[in-house]
Amino acid sequence: MTYSFDFGWLASYWPVFAAGVAMTLQLIVIGGLLGIALGIACAWARSLGPRWLGTPVAVYVELIRNTPFLIQLFFIFFGLPALGLRLGEVQAATLAMVINLGAYAAEIIRAGIEATPRGQFEAGASLAMSRIQTFRHVVLVPALERIWPALASQVVIVMLGSAVVSQIAVEDLTFAANFAQSRSFRAFEAYAVSTVIYLGLAIALRAALMRLGGLIFPAPETAR
Amino acid sequence: MTQFTFVDILTNLLWASRWTVLLSLAAFAGGGLLALGLLFAAIGRARWPGRLARLYVEIFQGTPLLMQLFLAFFGLGLLGIDVSPWLAACAALILWSAAFLVEIWRGCVMAIGRGQWEASAALGMGYAAQMRHVVLPQALRLAVPPTVGFSVQVVKGTALTSIIGFLELTKAGTVLSNASFQPFTVFGLVALIYFALCFPLSVGARRLERKLNVAH
């Protein structure tokens, strides 16, 4: 049996792929922002917050980090309606990504917070900064700067992991590939093309995040 | 119509998890062997093998595991091989885990200080002897905690093989959920079984790391 590859037919499917890329990007932008925000809150709770808050947050982090994203997605989309929480597929996918990234980001950011020298807390206090001001200006920003590359990698991992949201019928890039191959019966070509697009998205997302890091955390001036 | 009791669901899920465990072991062992081969390319002095190893890592870490599974499933078929989901799942997971393991291990070899290389060179050791007696034994110690940590990712990665039709824990979960109309219970249990598999590995990795940090 010989099989000749044919990628030409894919050209007519470009609007489907473009819409898929747009959905994948939408998911990672919203999921990424909210996930990092959740991660910051959880990192604070675990390293500096009260114990009654730290313990449940630790349980959340361990539960998420030790179960597959696909199961988290299925639990939210298929399981939660039993408790009366019915979400659309895009909402469910976004929520799953936020919860997933939040747990990983919490651990990454916590490592950054715990690397803060003790004296800096005291220095903040001696400048009459409130605890919240100290956290924000003295602890959090340098912590984020320290761990930014790790956080960026995690966001890329979550973006690649989001390929499974097509399983609950979210029309992302993988969905576009599934759609194209089901019409044309040329599965290999459809998946090969979307794999290359994913690779491009991963490289671009990483570059964009590192650029963003450079903007948020400018290099200190030499005089300091 | 069959009624599913809680015990029915749990026993079925536990029975299916043996495939999750087997697939994880196969992927981890195969991935480890492949990574070992790639490692020598990645840390060796020859230029092209090093570049190829880096390209390999970039491609497999930069694309979704789901796509790799699809390509293995449909691509192996094009080669005229009769592909079972088990074969495709093994192939894709081995290639995928090798990409991560080789990066982890390369980092461990790189962490061995220049002084060690220079000292062993001063003792008249060649590259092979340096590797065998000085660098690799030390790198191996560093590599154990992150390698155990990565095994968690492998176990979780096997969940995706349900999508190409391999009947493991996740697939059993979706089938049971459809048959029993109890998605909350089923997926809750599936999550707990994954947790029971992964959490001990996570804790083990953390303990090993702490022990290593104390030793240094």
Image: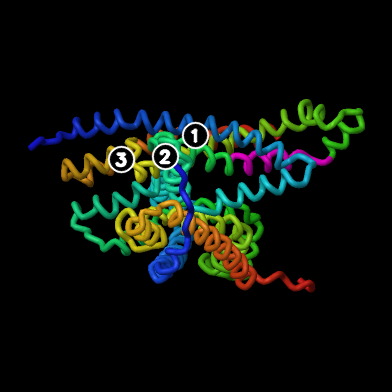
Q: Is residue B202 visible?
A: no
Residue A192 location (% of width, % of height): 48, 54
Q: Same subunit under labels 3 and 2?
A: yes
Residue B199 location (% of width, % of height): 43, 36
Q: Quarter-wise, where is residue A177 in the image?
A: bottom left
Amino acid type at mark 1:
Ala
Of residues A97 and A2, the one drawn nearer to the viewer in this rendering: A2
**Is the residue under label 1 in contact with that under label 2 (CB below 8 Å)?**
yes
What is the span of residues highlighted in magenta in the rendered image? B101-114
Which color scheme did the rendering employ for the protein? rainbow
Residue name at image x 58 percent, y 33 percent: B32
Q: Secondary structure at mark 2?
A: helix
Amino acid type at mark 3:
Lys
Q: CA distance from mark 3 to mark 1?
A: 18 Å
**Residue B158, numbered label:** 2
Amino acid type at mark 2:
Thr
Dot 1 corresponds to which residue? B27
Indicate the quadrant containing the N terminus of chain A: top left, top right, bottom left or bottom right: top left
Q: Same subunit under labels 3 and 1?
A: yes
Q: CA distance from mark 2 to mark 1?
A: 9 Å
Between disc 2 and disc 1, whose residue precedes?
1
Q: In the rendered view, would you say A55 is above or below B17?
A: below
Q: Residues within 10 Å of mark 2 (few under 14, many from 20)?
A: many
Residue B93 location (% of width, % of height): 48, 39
In the rendered image, the residue lying farthest to the front is A1
Q: Quarter-wise, where is residue B7 in the image?
A: top left
